[in-house]
Image (cartoon, rainbow, N blue to C red):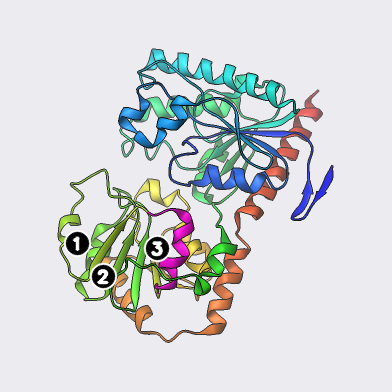
Amino acid sequence: MTAAPDGPVRDGLVVLASGVSWDDAAMSEKRLALALSTRTHVLFVDPPVSVLTPLRKPHLTAAARRPGLRTVAPRLARVTPLAPPGVSRPGLRRLALAATRVTIRRAVRRLGLSPTALVAASLDDVFGALPAVPHILWATDDWVAGAELMGLDRAVVERDERAQLGRSDLVAAVSQVLADRLGTTGVPTHLLPNGVDAQPLSTCDEAPPATDVRLPQPIATFIGHVSARIDVQALLAVAGTGSSLLLVGPQPTVSSLDGLTELLAHDNVQWTGARPAQDLPGYLRLTTVGLTPYADTAFNRASHPLKTLEYLAAGRAAVATDLPAARLIPADLVRLCRTPAEFATATVEALARPVDPELVTRRRAYAAQHSWQVRADRMLALIDEAAQARRAQR
């Protein structure tokens, strides 16, 4: 073990089989991998792709053309398994996952490092790639509750979840609701919520303001995907107050979301489209209050939204739907709402409230306690626990 400026570096290799590609929006897996790489070597494994994948997802073109092992950051490598076209079909899916297991083994051999754990952030059958190391299921969402949202057969997802739990030594669940459900299966289950890249967001007041924002201040901002998970009616209620409403994120894949067309027709609403993570401080500099309007569904109740922590890391006020994960945040740091009308009222009040430097400091301090680095250190502790349990069983 050697010393690093940001803390000790552990020997070995953590293999993280992601549920989304490195080239997708920067979701939990990518952020955790980057944080883990400050402590140990990491191999990030993309979901399998085929030569036809770029037709549906053009941003994955480079990965499909150059899928081999490559370094993306110090102590962080990435590999993209190749599979035949039609990987979503059951028979071909099995072939794709077999290819993924082979790809993992080959990448580990090429890196020449001893694996210490295989972390799976999906229900894909990848654990057989490294049978001798601890198998951690990182439940980033309630996949069963979200089956319909993702266009999947709930019964099939339930079956796959049971099988994956049977292969797991330990489960790390993103919310207490999800941990409580998965913990009934007998597999040791722990809470590991999403984190936040607190440091870069904490300096947003020094960042150059985004130049494409045409709305007058004060501004209420929603950062993220407008999808079926989002309560568009809450955003519509905010827009109806005449307040400046800024939407920062990709265009929705579901154009029929109730109220979306009406929302975008408001003169006081601006949609920037997708923006890279490094541009977010510039938008948050112009933001007075950040919005997390999630629909009250079983899937969302088991989730842990990243965006509220991002707003707090920037020192901004936050208004969020009253869901279990949001209730863990101190009450003076976030305003929780149950209806679109409450959401709009809370937003207007937050926009009118003078900046309180002490409250700004406490928001940022809270977010710093929930950074991705904190989450990475917790994951490493869970890996150690699973390894110890395996040794005790011998």
Q: Which quadrant, please, contains the C terminus?
A: top right
Residue 238's disc number: 2
Give left or right: position of 366 versus 326. Answer: right
Q: Amino acid at mark 1?
A: Leu
- C-alpha separation, residue under disc 3 versus residue under disc 2: 16 Å
- C-alpha separation, residue under disc 2 versus residue under disc 1: 10 Å
Q: Amino acid at mark 3?
A: Asp
Can residue 179 be spotted in the picture? no
Give the foreground label among 2 and 1.
1
Secondary element at image label 2 = helix
Percent of width and height locating residue 245: 29, 69
Residue 322's disc number: 3
Q: Earlier in the sequence, mark 3 or mark 2?
A: 2
Give left or right: position of 350 versus 244. Answer: right
Can residue 77 be spotted in the picture? yes
- Place residue 295 in its image quadrant: bottom left
Residue at the spot 39% in from the left edge and 65% down from the top edge: 320
**Pointer 3 local density, CA inside 10 Å: few below 14, some 14–19, many at least 20:** many
**Pointer 1 local density, CA inside 10 Å: few below 14, some 14–19, many at least 20:** many
**Residues in magenta?**
275-287
Queried whether the magenta region covers residue 106, the answer comes back as no
**Pointer 2 local density, CA inside 10 Å: few below 14, some 14–19, many at least 20:** many
Residue at the spot 46% in from the left edge and 73% down from the top edge: 316
Residue 337's disc number: none
Residue position for label 1? 263
